[in-house]
Amino acid sequence: MASSALLARTFNRRLAVSTLSRISRRTATTQTTATGEEVVYVPGGPIYKGTVNDPTTFPTPNRSHGSYHWSFERLLSAALVPLTGAAFVTSGSNFPVVDGLLGITLIMHSHIGFDAVLTDYVHTRKFPVLGNVATWTLRAATAGVLVGVYQFNTNDIGLTELVARLWAA
């Protein structure tokens, strides 16, 4: 018991000494920005003038990022529910437009999902080569699947007829 207390005190003292020596070694330097403002820089990050209650600047909305992209994903996912029901209520050979729309929306939905996985786990900042290879592989696979589904829907029985035959088998 006494040895553990002694060990804890020694460890805490060493931690305090190393922390204080690191803090004392930090030297503040000032840098001038492009607008002429002087920003105090300390290793570990800059110190900005102002308070936490000052407003921040937000990036301008972009249709390919942020809320527009998120809204498109949600609309696509919500559209799959009635489209799937309509495709299976009607036969694919009688309504090829519904069968084609189902094929395209399923592929788009899958592409967006896999792209989100690649963005989250194989980002190009961390994996510069593997990230680009994976992204372009996904794009090529999506293009190939689009061609294959188009060929299957126009020259063969179509997606909904395939599922109907599989369920009847």
Image (cartoon, rainbow, N blue to C red):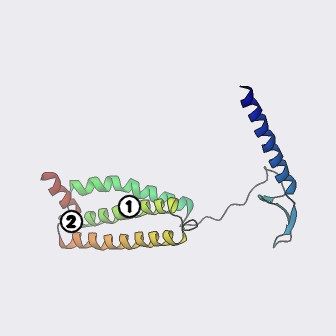
Tell us which disc is closer to us: 1 or 2: 1
Residue indicated by mark 1: 110
Q: Amino acid at mark 2?
A: Gly
Mark 2 surroundings within 10 Å by alpha-carbon count, few (fewer than 14), some (14 through 19), many (20 or more): many
Task: Name the residue at 46% across, 59% down.
Answer: 117
Q: Position of residue 120 (x, y in %)?
A: 52, 59
Q: Are marks 1 and 2 in contact (CB under 8 Å)?
A: no
Disc 2 secondary structure class: loop
Disc 1 from disc 2: Cα separation: 19 Å
Q: Secondary structure at mark 1?
A: helix
Q: Position of residue 1 (x, y in %)?
A: 71, 25
Q: Residue drawn 74% across and 26% down?
A: 2
- 18 or 161: which is nearer to us? 18
Residue under pointer 2: 158
Q: Is residue 119 left or right of residue 30?
A: left
Counting every numbered tag in the picture gives 2
Relative to 111, 130 lies left or right: right
Query: Residue 75's x, y, as percent?
Result: 43, 57
Which of the 4 image quarters holds residue 158? bottom left
Earlier along the polypeptide chain: callout 1 or callout 2? 1
Q: Is residue 39 left or right of residue 86?
A: right
* Residue drawn at point x = 27 percent, y = 72 percent: 148
